[in-house]
Amino acid sequence: MAISAPITVPHGTVTAKLNFSRHPPEGQVAFNYVDAPPAGEPQHNVEKFFQDVTIEDVRGRESESTLDNDAFQIIQDVPESKEKEFADDASIKANYYPEVEKLLLDHIPGSNRIFLFDHTIRRAGPNANRKAVQSVHIDQTESSAKKRVHTHMGEDAEKLLQGRYRIVNVWRPLNKNPVESMPLGFASSATLDQKDVIPVEHRYPHGYVGQTAAIAYNPAQKWYYLSGMVGSERLLLECFDSESSKEGTSVKGGRVAHTAFEHPGSRPDAEGRESIEVRALVFGP
């Protein structure tokens, strides 16, 4: 009987290339056309480049980071999900969404209302519809966060906007084994200067405009990853926190830049990383 090769999980502080963005020319709004651009216009006006960055492994220090300080938080020993396959959207919503809602209510102090508005599954195969994103970004901006509240919360939106509201992604790997390749890197919000956040309009057909943020490189940014993530671990990625804009707040930024990256210690034939992220509006206190 053939003996399987041992799993080699790369770990420890590493220097890797992350894909950053440059600010558009002065006076221009950063944009990206989701489909074909209008005649005579480019697809986008944000130039990207790779930069070597030191990325610390937080394995063994999982409890040190918090949403209020870093805009990321690690949760361990999560019970096995009722959802087994993560292949059918209706099944995911019926089985996994309630678990995510409970997780957020249990681990974000003062939260009292959760609305899960979508999810994305990323696969590693050559024919996968969605793969790991290798570009430093933040999923939402203040503008798009407010738009999400209005879109999803109906007549309660204005009242909810008067209190604390956040957008938090709940990220987990789907691999049966610890993650070997394409881990997720994330920068502490406390080290991310607002001038390095580049709002990008995503222009859709028929006039709809969404907004995410690209990130410019700054050596002051502190980058981290969690080596060998397993299915019983969750990574909370806070994209926006309304509390961060208030005077005297202890919330340091409330937005986490993140990206998948190629770990130089990964074996060429390592199992591809697969994952699911569920996006949530979190209200309260």
Image (tube, rainbow, N blue to C red):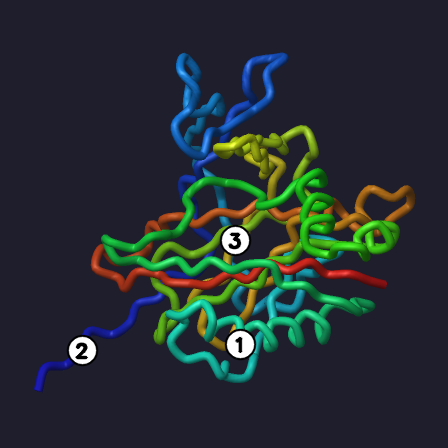
Q: CA distance from mark 3 to mark 2?
A: 30 Å
- How far from the left and from the top, in percent, is residue 170? 57, 63
> Is label 2 in contact with label 1 (beta carbons under 8 Å)?
no
User: Could you tell me which residue is drawn at 75 percent across and 56 percent down?
Assistant: 68
Q: Secondary structure at mark 1?
A: helix
Position of 236 relative to 218 (above/below): below
Say which of marks 3 and 1 sits in front: 1
Say which of marks 3 and 2 sits in front: 2
N-terminal label among 3 and 1: 3
Position of 248 relative to 30 (above/below): below
Q: CA distance from mark 3 to mark 1?
A: 36 Å
Where is mark 3, residue-wise? 56
Q: Which residue is situated farthest in the left direction here? A: 1
Position of 61 relative to 54 (above/below): below
Where is mark 2, residue-wise? 4
Q: Residues within 10 Å of mark 1 (few under 14, many from 20)?
A: few
Q: Which residue is situated farthest in the bottom direction here? A: 1
> Is label 3 in contact with label 1 (beta carbons under 8 Å)?
no
User: Could you tell me which residue is drawn at 57 percent across and 31 percent down?
Assistant: 200
Where is mark 1, residue-wise? 94
Q: Residues within 10 Å of mark 3 (few under 14, many from 20)?
A: many
Q: Amino acid at mark 2?
A: Ser
The foreground one among 150 and 262 is 150
N-terminal label among 2 and 1: 2
- How far from the left and from the top, in percent, is residue 172? 49, 66
Q: Secondary structure at mark 2?
A: loop
Q: Position of 267 compared to 205: left or right?
A: left
User: Could you tell me which residue is drawn at 55 percent across and 14 percent down?
Assistant: 25
Q: CA distance from mark 2 to mark 1?
A: 36 Å
Q: Amino acid at mark 1?
A: Ala
N-terminal label among 3 and 2: 2
